[in-house]
Image (cartoon, grey):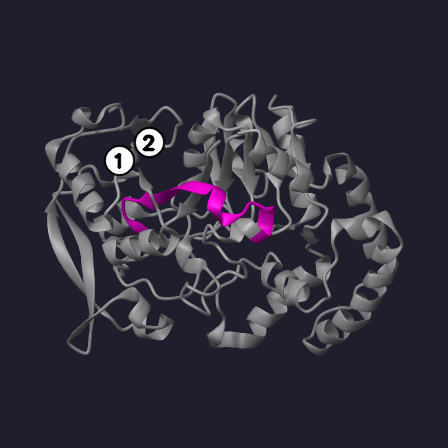
Amino acid sequence: MAVTAVIGSQWGDEGKGKAVDFLAERADYVARFNGGNNAGHTVINEFGTFKIHLVPSGIFARNTVGLIGGGVVIDPQVLIDEIEMLNKAGVGMDGRFWISPRSHIIMPYHKILDGLYEEAKGAGATGTTRRGIGPVFADKVSYNGIRWTDFASDAFENRLKVQLELKNKIIVALGGEALKYESVRDEYRGYYIKLKPYIRELFSIVQDGLKTGKNFLLEQAMGTFLDTDWGTYPFVTASTTIPSAASAGLGIPSKYITDIVGVTKAYTTRVGAGPLPTEILDTKSAVYEQFGEVAATTGRIRRVGWLDLEIVKTAVQLSGVTELCLTKLDVLSGLDNLQVCVGYKLNGEPVRYADVDAYGLDKVETIYQAIPGWKEDISKARTFEDLPVNAQNYVKMIEEAAGVPVRWIGVGPEREATIRR
């Protein structure tokens, strides 16, 4: 039995979807344990191209069962759309995909409040996805949440009435329009009817799987530095993103998590507000154009920067990463010189990521090391030896700084465009 957690070692968008997709071939179960549909994982394989927000990215492996743990918050319409999309593509979800009844549900007032709060903050807005993630997690910890298990009795109607009485007052006070009870009740009853065949308590599935030696692949949403506690607070997500969250969010004790894969992009990106020490601010530069990306979830242009080894090294230490999956190395092809951040200074003194808060991180001086680039197209490389020497040296430099091996190297978006070492 092996339990492998796949995490992002930066600010999300590292390419975890592709990593989970090709690692799932040996997994009996693939599972999401945190976050919600603010995650966006892009998968390209024989079934087509998919942008997935809730269903585990490893669901395409024929013998794999997908799980969504109670630590995940669910927008029902998004999940229904994904299930229908995957069934239409021939993936086949029935009988091999289960949702925990403990999962909290994103209600329409959560999304409304998410937007109203951001607008009310003005210049102090944190750059949320406005998907209702923060408000639903706030309700979860303040005993105001609604879960799938509530639909099995009259608890849903009773809880919804109370919540609308509370939330409508806030919505109206912030300039929004009050929601109608009957409309929300009927809409979500309809969602429950569609999703009920997939809702099942996961505890026995997980525990029996651990006892019988099944392989689990755990898929993190977001990235390490969007973690509520260890990320660049308040510019973070609303859930814990490090592997230990799988214990609460799925029911897997931490002692069973034996392998932790840190997915690391060959450069750095970030969506929304918050510090990005290596950010390339010249949006007209050739490097910015080459690194430019669009976020899978929000459609926003990602901020881009050079690789930050201090961030990667901190993620490895914090989460106990055992090996790295380096993605998008091909994007660096064609650059004469690469810059890599190897450390920070603040007020002339060396500091580490953990020594400063988000506002201090925004003020650090980045220490760069120049690395020779390469001109060759590496998208067809399938062995480490196929890579140009300078590309090999770039990988080795990351290994040395992180203290763990790079086992996989992505040289293109497709599943097969992966070097396995």
Q: In this view, does 387 lie above or below 355?
A: above
Q: Mark 2 points at which residue?
A: 412
Report the front residue among 290 and 92. Answer: 92
Quadrant that contains the C terminus: top left
Report the front residue among 237 and 42. Answer: 237
Q: Are marks 1 and 2 in contact (CB under 8 Å)?
A: yes
SS of the residue under disc 2: loop
Q: Is residue 229 left or right of residue 325?
A: right
Q: Residues within 10 Å of mark 2 (few under 14, many from 20)?
A: some
**As drawn, which residue projects farthest toward the front?**
211
Q: Mark 1 points at which residue?
A: 330
Q: In this view, does 384 lie to the left or right of 80?
A: left
Measure the C-alpha gap from mark 1 to mark 2.
6 Å
Report the front residue among 303 and 315. Answer: 315
Q: What residue span does the magenta drawing correspond to?
A: 248-268
Q: Which residue is drawn at 49% across and 36% down?
A: 217
Q: In this view, does 122 lie to the left or right of 326?
A: right
Report the front residue among 319 and 176. Answer: 319
Q: Which amino acid does label 2 sit on?
A: Gly
SS of the residue under disc 1: helix
